[in-house]
Image (cartoon, rainbow, N blue to C red):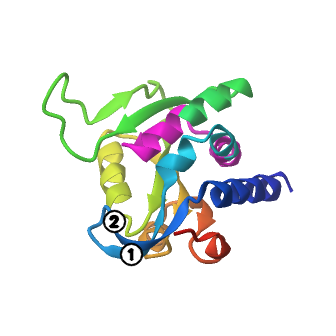
Amino acid sequence: MKELILRERLKERINTLGILKQGNFVLSSGARSGQYFDCKTLIGDPKSLEYISLLLLDRIKQESVVAVGGIVLGGALLSTALSAFASLYWVDITTFMIRTTNKFYGLQKVIEGTIPLGANKKVALIDDVITTGKTIMKAVQIVEERGYEISLILTVYDRNEGGSKKLKDMGYTFYSILQNESDLKPFYHD
């Protein structure tokens, strides 16, 4: 019941803020789309961020993860907010950020932040939107190469263009708060 209420409130914020737009957009995958889910604007809205964090926290608590990794940029913002919200509910989850491209300055890290040391190597990954899954799969590879087990992959919005299916077919547990078409069709804005 709580999840349903939070999702409906989030949809209302999406509508109010005009987050789902129609037009001609180039996505990070390079593909063109007639719609764009402006998740960075949604993340910048305090009420929306609260609803997103609470919805994702419920999923993360079920998986006994020690850390949440956010894919730069949208996922990193979400993982940081989620960690902060978790602490308000006495849930200790650290956060780390994953770059899917190389950094050529400073310490040149691909993973920044904190993943606790110890026997439990279970982590969750977050990105704001999934389309083809290319970015998430790159992050999965980076995290797994370092010996961590990905218990859960989370997004705010699944465009339903094959990425989530690919992850599920590979055996990953995937959860998205919202789905293209079925959840947001009435919320299109120009």
| Amino acid type assigned to the residue bearing label 2 in the image | Leu
Residues 113 and 44: in front is: 44
Q: Give residue 184's mark.
A: none
Residue at the left extreme, as displayed: 104
Residue found 63% across the figure and 70% down from its top: 184
Quadrant of the image for the N terminus?
bottom right
Q: Is 18 located above or below residue 69 in the figure?
A: below
Q: Give the main secondary structure, helix, strand or loop, of the magenta stretch.
A: helix
The spot of residue 81 in percent (x, y) is 57, 34
Q: Which residue is mark 2?
A: 27
| Occupied quadrant, residue 23 | bottom left
Q: Is residue 175 above or below residue 185?
A: above
Residue indicated by mark 1: 33
Q: How many marks?
A: 2
Spot occupied by residue 109 in the image (x, y as percentages of width and height) = 24, 30
Contact check, label 1 and label 2, Cβ < 8 Å: yes
Q: Residues within 10 Å of mark 1 (few under 14, many from 20)?
A: few
Residue range highlighted in magenta: 52-80
Judge left or right: residue 31 versus residue 43: left
Q: Is residue 141 left or right of residue 180?
A: left
Query: As rendered, which of 168 and 21 lies closer to the eye?
Result: 21
